[in-house]
Image (cartoon, rainbow, N blue to C red):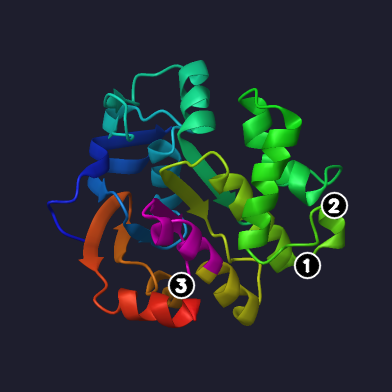
């Protein structure tokens, strides 16, 4: 990714403390539009804490996080209260989690449409848009199934659709393939990459799987709350193209 590509997130000197444990220790990171960034590290390295701070889920105890969303003024996230952070999560960011966190009492299309409904869209319009995303992700005909009637891979595709329906420029994923077998993991990752960087959006993903990380454009490694390596993956474009075919 060229350094001329504008940044969408800029973190500087991030600190997050839990009692005596410093989960993030002066972390600085710039993420540019259209990147797919894999965040790796051993358990306790701070990778999930970093993701949660960047995604406005947790406030850092020190440092700065500037969000530069398209067609909006830059916003400093570090000092926002929970209500303001929730609004940004709802309107600007998308999320995919390991266990998908879908509502079992809702159908696939209702789950995918939920962010639009929370923004006040009419149900008919929201579900029409959600159904289009489900179809794009290979789930046409499954819109009315409840989550318990879907496979793990299908449920994760519903979660990807939910993350994309608002047109969020940045999607955060926390171990999105961690609960899947290797074949399903590859399919879900292809769907996630195509839905984000394939649409010129940005993906920030925590993963423990080096095969998953290598399909991103960049790998950031943490140890003891600090970034110890930040490298571009030269073969990522070929890997993503092969996976999409």
Work out whether residue 168 or residue 185 is closer to the camera in this orientation and state it: 168
Q: Can residue 206 be seen?
A: yes
State which mark lies toward you, 1 or 3.
1
Q: How many marks?
A: 3
The residues tagged by marks 1 and 2 sit, at their Cα atoms, a distance apart of 14 Å
Residue 4: which disc? none
SS of the residue under disc 3: helix
Say whether residue 94 is magenta.
no
SS of the residue under disc 1: loop
Instruction: Please report the bounds of the magenta region as a residue range.
Output: 191-209
Position of 4 with respect to 123 (left or right) is: left
Q: Which residue is mark 2?
A: 144
Work out whether residue 101 or residue 92 is closer to the camera in this orientation and state it: 92
Work out whether residue 36 or residue 140 is closer to the camera in this orientation and state it: 140
Q: Can residue 100 be seen?
A: no
Position of 61 with respect to 119 (left or right) is: left
SS of the residue under disc 2: loop
Q: Which residue is mark 1?
A: 151
Q: Which residue is mark 3?
A: 212
Say whether residue 198 is magenta.
yes
> What residue sits 39% from the left and 19% below the top?
80
Position of 97 with respect to 63 (left or right) is: right
The residues tagged by marks 1 and 3 sit, at their Cα atoms, a distance apart of 20 Å
Residue 208: % across, % down: 47, 67
Residue 32: % across, % down: 25, 49
Decide: is 135 above or below 79. below
Decide: is 21 above or below 221. above
Work out whether residue 50 or residue 100 is closer to the camera in this orientation and state it: 100
- Verify CB contact (< 8 Å) between mark 2 and mark 3: no
The residues tagged by marks 2 and 3 sit, at their Cα atoms, a distance apart of 31 Å
């Amino acid at each position: 990714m060229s350094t001329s590509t504008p940044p969408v997130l800029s973190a500087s000197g991030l600190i997050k403390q839990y009692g005596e444990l410093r989960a993030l220790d002066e972390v600085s990171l710039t993420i540019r539009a259209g990147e797919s960034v894999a965040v790796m590290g051993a358990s306790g390295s701070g990778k999930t804490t970093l993701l949660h701070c960047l995604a406005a889920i947790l406030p850092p105890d020190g440092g700065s996080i500037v969000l530069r969303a398209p067609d909006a003024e830059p916003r400093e996230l570090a000092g926002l209260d929970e209500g303001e952070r929730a609004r940004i999560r709802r309107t600007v960011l998308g999320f995919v989690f390991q266990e998908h966190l879908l509502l079992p009492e809702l159908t696939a299309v209702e789950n995918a449409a939920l962010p639009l409904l929370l923004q006040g869209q009419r149900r008919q319009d929201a579900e029409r848009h959600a159904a289009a995303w489900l179809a794009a992700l290979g789930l046409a005909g499954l819109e009315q199934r409840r989550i318990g009637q879907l496979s793990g891979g299908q449920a994760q595709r519903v979660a990807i659709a939910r993350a994309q329906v608002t047109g969020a420029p940045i999607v955060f994923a926390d171990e999105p393939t961690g609960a899947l077998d290797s074949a399903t993991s590859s399919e879900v990752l292809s769907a996630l990459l195509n839905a984000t960087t394939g649409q010129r959006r940005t993906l920030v993903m925590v993963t423990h799987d080096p095969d998953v990380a290598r399909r991103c454009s960049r790998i950031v490694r943490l140890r003891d709350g600090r970034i110890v390596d930040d490298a571009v993956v030269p073969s990522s474009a070929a890997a993503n193209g092969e996976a999409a075919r």
